[in-house]
Amino acid sequence: MKLAGVDEAGKGPVLGPMVIAGVMYSVEGENINQTPVEMEGLNLRDSKEIPYKKRISLANKIRKTADEIYSIRVEAPQIDELRKIMNMNDILVESYSKVLNNINFDAIVMDAADVNEERFCNRIRKKIEKKDRVMISEHNADDKYPIVSAASIIAKAERDKEIERLEKEIGMDIGSGYPADDITVNFLEKWISEKGNLPTFARKSWSTSKKILENFSQKKFKDFE
């Protein structure tokens, strides 16, 4: 059976892209919860629970052993434009569907990006070519199914690589990119105070961006009082 998993990394951050990855292994039998032979003993789980160095090591092993890997990136400006006409769940439906249309599979397991798991799965099924295949969508699938853990690791490693590239390019530490990260917030505040606008890799439609811009504008106004 051609068993595939799909997951995303970067849905919530205010900085950087969102990455959606699909990973396919040929496995024996029909058990969708099995660990591919090539990954046995590696304790695959949600990429966020795996230390950085271990995650990179696992990603390299998955790239070498998987039958197929396909990933897409949705950059910050794209997310901002798409959010004018749809919400993040809609964007994920479109993104997952694109990944699924570019990998072979008999069965697919996905991490659900909707409170309603079945609805998310059905929306994707309508948009893909292989409508007759086994499709499962569950919350926390990256912790339950090794094949989804593999996809999660690939997506997170690719996003990590892009964050590292951005930091080297601008010569500043931007943190994880998540709104709850003080390093990320401090970076945005410093950038805006020096340049007067948001960096191109920031999601302008995020409340974090809007709040920091608003605070900066208010501060500038007070300086002229």
Image (spheres, rainbow, N blue to C red):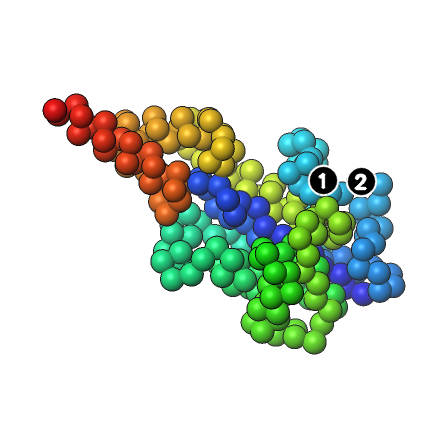
Amino acid type, callout 2 = Leu
> Which SS class for mark 2?
loop
Query: Residue 96's spot in the image, x, y percent?
Result: 58, 60
Mark 1 vs 2: CB contact within 8 A: yes
Q: Is residue 184 left or right of residue 131?
A: left
Examine the image and state in which quarter residue 22 appears. Answer: bottom right
Query: Residue 159's spot in the image, x, y percent?
Result: 55, 42
**Looking at the image, is mark 1 or mark 2 earlier in the sequence?**
2
Residue 165 visible somewhere in the drawing = no
Query: Which residue is denoted by mark 2 in the rendering?
Result: 42
Furthest residue in direction left, as rendered: 225
> Which SS class for mark 1?
helix
Residue 115 visible somewhere in the drawing = yes
Furthest residue in direction right, as rendered: 29
Q: Residue at x 54, y 62 (%)?
A: 93
Query: Which residue is denoted by mark 1 in the rendering?
Result: 58
Q: Is residue 47 left or right of residue 210?
A: right
Residue 89 is tagged as none
Q: Residues within 10 Å of mark 2 (few under 14, many from 20)?
A: few
Q: Please tell me which residue lies in front, 8 or 206.
A: 206
Q: Residue at x 52, y 63 (%)?
A: 94
Q: Residues within 10 Å of mark 1 (few under 14, many from 20)?
A: many
